[in-house]
Image: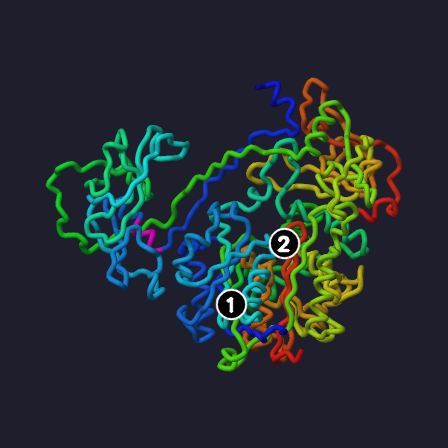
Amino acid sequence: MFHFRTMSRTLSAPVTVAFDYTRSTGPVLGRFFGGLRDGRVLAARLSDGTVVAPPPEFDPSTHEETAELVEVSTVGTVTSWSWVPEPVAGQPFDRPFAFALVTLDGATAPMLHALDVASPDEVSTGMRVRVRWAAERTGHITDIACFEPAGDSDEGPGAFPAPAGAVDPVTGIVTPVSLDYTYAASPEESAFYRGLAEGRILGQRCPTCHKVYVPPRSACPVDGVATTDEVELSSRGTVTTFCIVNVPFLGQQIKPPYVSAYVLLDGADIALLHLILDIPAEEVRMGMRVEAVWKPRDEWGTTIENISHFRPTGEPDADYETYQHHL
Amino acid sequence: MGKQPAAVVGVGQTHHRAKREDVSMAGLCREAMDRALEDAGMTLDDIDAIVVGKAPDLFEGVMMPELYLAESLGAAGKPLLRVHTAGSVGGSTAIVASSLVQSGVHKRVLTVAFEKQSESNAMWALSVPLPFNMPVHAGAGGYFAPHVRSYIRRSGAPTHVGAIVAAKDRQNALRNPYAHLRNPDTTVESVLASQMLWDPIRYDETCPSSDGACALVIVDEDTAAASPNPAWIHGTVMRSEPTTAAERDQVNPQAGREAAAALWKQAGITSPIDEIDVAEIYVPFSWFEPMWLENLGFAAEGEGWKLTEAGETAMDGRIPLNCSGGVLSSNPIGASGMLRFAEAALQVRGAAGEHQVDGARRALGHAYGGGSQFFAMWVVGADKPTN
């Protein structure tokens, strides 16, 4: 299996994109979340007489902002369900469970949540279920840990919907998002990264316009044809233009200030974005001649980061005319 | 059959702020929409179709927000389209909406664009490190700063021109009650004294991060007859090009030049600087004012900064630019392009309030996005087009 992977035409690597988004709830959902924090489920009474939880922010018929909230029961009836045999990360349980549509007593439309039962044999449409509250409630949909079977308890429909009364609204919630991707380089980029693992910088020439692209592309963006002729490039080049990054930001991997520069390698027709070091940032110039500084060979992988950075060669600056058409 | 005439008869926008914690995304959109509908003398029941625009989904972490927003936006039972062209999206969205009317498919289309930057971090979202690649990306400022440096080198512009733009737009913003930044003390000197963030771009030369939305009601000729001051659409254009290509002109992109040429031709304009009374162009970093002046054909290549330096882009200049304060004063990314289109419409409707240019008859709205690779523009006028 491993042998097969190494024979693969393309390189791939995992990448995770994760952020804790901070949501403003607005007045309607803010009261709904405030209700959950207080151990109550609030619903909208809409203009057509329906009672819906969670409450829509705007009435679908009149388009007015939802004004009236009512309290519905924490006991209800399963109207449909789906079994989850293999839960994935981020779901309510790490063991099999059901997702169920539950119409709470007093409501006219169902809400979706998890139902904690051991097997699909224990769930059926029409079964009675009740809210199982989380141990600590913060004003979030997860304040409802799940639904659980209500059995033959005598909790009937009761006096719901009931007036919602006063509720201290939640104004914001945090919704963490984490996405795991497999980042795949194209076959041409893979050849470029494998070349770097051997200390070589490989580009490709467009057979139509004869421009040399580094990293190589699957197709020339101007002519739309495959760039097939491999060209090995010098590790020397010219800084065309650059930016001195002074600003720190979330996820930054290089400590500012640093110089992010377009380096036009000798023999290439497009500049490569890389880092300039071994010179004070304020002395970096357009036209400055630079060369790649490679990391120690035992640190190399299939990555552009094998080149630690570029440094000045000490040659005279390139004439503006030699790179002005690359700006 | 040619295009049917179309006009903007309703304009609405939110009060743009760093954090609009009082409203959800739906509430933010509705604030702009309800103002546009009120301006048009209509309700959602009068609307045939809704067109939504916003920038990349990673900015709010809601995949396809139009799905969950449909009901709140009053789109149930109607066509709902979402447009996505990075920072230019607000402009492209308005153009898609207008094309639905110009094609004769719909008579009354509502379009809305928004961003709630406070829910996320756009700088992070634009700089996610990718395997095998060099992690030198540093947000939009880091992307555009090298090209600003190239412009300065190519044009020979004095280095304070960017500060002139920033000071002008911040002063203009004081006349716009919806603007996010309200800094009465901003001067060329204070901009030059502000911190260098992405050298050569200073802190005061960058746009803020805003929550906000903008909405337009675009209607056909018959419906526009009921409006006291429709903004007639004289031309619309969109163009795109690759983010990177060998010898691609990143300072004066081909797609922008060709888009502008096509737009002027459509609108019957031969000398933009003489025939356009006021323009709202997408300037997220101050130096893009002179750069786009050249790209749009208001000035010859290398000459845009001279208009800025001479004060010709001020409210009383030859070509007033961004009288609303522009992107430099309010930047709800997805809405920023539509705000340019909306402000152009307000000007020719005579409805721009304190930042109105007297007698404005024809105005340009402009947006760009991605790595200067998407362009969207329109010309609106006080008079019904004759072409």
Residue A200, relative to residue B379: is it above or below?
above
Span colored in magenta:
A27-32
Give the residue number, with chain letter if any, for mark 1: B216
The residue nearer to you, when weighing B165 against A93, is A93
Whether residue B281 is visible to the viewer of this picture, yes or no, is no
Q: Position of residue A266 (x, y in %)?
A: 84, 36
Which of the two residues, B31 or B46, is positioned nearer the viewer here?
A: B46
What amino acid does circle 1 point to? Answer: Leu
Picture quarter containing residue A36? top left
Q: Is residue B142 above or below residue B158?
A: above
State the image coordinates of residue A49 (x, y, percent, origin top left).
Answer: 24, 61
- Residue B188 lies in the magenta-colored region: no
Main SS, magenta residues = helix
Residue A31 within the magenta-colored segment of the rendering? yes
* Residue under numbered circle 2: B369
Q: Is residue A72 visible?
A: yes
Residue B63 is left or right of residue A61, and the answer is right
Q: Residues within 10 Å of mark 2 (few under 14, many from 20)?
A: many
Q: Earlier in the sequence, mark 1 or mark 2?
A: 1
What residue do we see at 35% from left, 31% from top?
Answer: A85
The quarter of the picture where the N terminus of chain A appears is: top right
Please report, as a chain letter, where disc 1 is located. Answer: B
Q: Position of residue B143 (x, y in %)?
A: 67, 46
